[in-house]
Image (cartoon, helix red, strand yellow):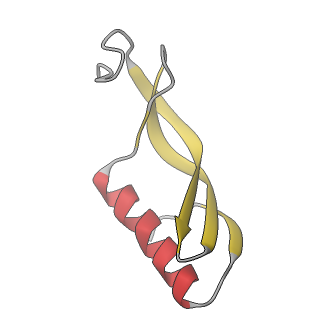
Amino acid sequence: MKCVICRHGETALGKVTVTLEDDGATIVIREVPTRVCQTCGEEYVDEEIASRLLQIAEEASQAGVQIDVRRYIAA
């Protein structure tokens, strides 16, 4: 896939760390599968994974978590 940000680089499969904040909670999720531009470093997370990340953040926030660090595990 051609990067839509820099328009020069190609993306490759990789893993990144995503930090989400919601209602005073900070959720850090490591090893999230994504595509990363080899030129500019822009990260692309597909829709299914993005939905899962938001679900994880919402569950943690509702549980009263203030800070949480975890490894990504697909549902």
Q: Residue furthest front?
A: 24
Name the spot of residue 23 as percent of width and height, x first. Answer: 53, 77
Quarter of the view holding residue 45: top left
Instruction: Decide which of 48, 24 is in the foreground and name it.
Output: 24
Quarter of the view holding residue 60: bottom right
Image quadrant where one finds the N terminus:
top left
Instruction: Decide which of 33, 22 is in the foreground and name it.
Output: 22
Q: Residue at x 67, y 65 (%)?
A: 70
Q: Is residue 5 above or below residue 51?
A: above
Q: Residue at x 66, y 83 (%)?
A: 65
Q: Residue at x 35, y 64 (%)?
A: 51
How many numbered circles are shown?
0
Name the spot of residue 35 as percent of width and height, x first. Answer: 43, 34
Q: Is residue 63 left or right of residue 6?
A: right
Q: Is residue 30 left or right of residue 20?
A: right
Name the spot of residue 4 as percent of width and height, x first. Answer: 28, 23
Name the spot of residue 32 as percent of width and height, x first. Answer: 54, 50
Q: Is residue 60 left or right of residue 50?
A: right
Image quadrant where one finds the C terminus:
bottom left
Q: Is residue 4 left or right of residue 40?
A: left
Q: Is residue 13 above or below residue 53?
A: above
Q: Residue furthest bottom?
A: 63
Q: Residue at x 42, y 68 (%)?
A: 54
Q: Is residue 4 above or below residue 59?
A: above
Quarter of the view holding residue 68: bottom right
Q: Residue furthest top?
A: 8
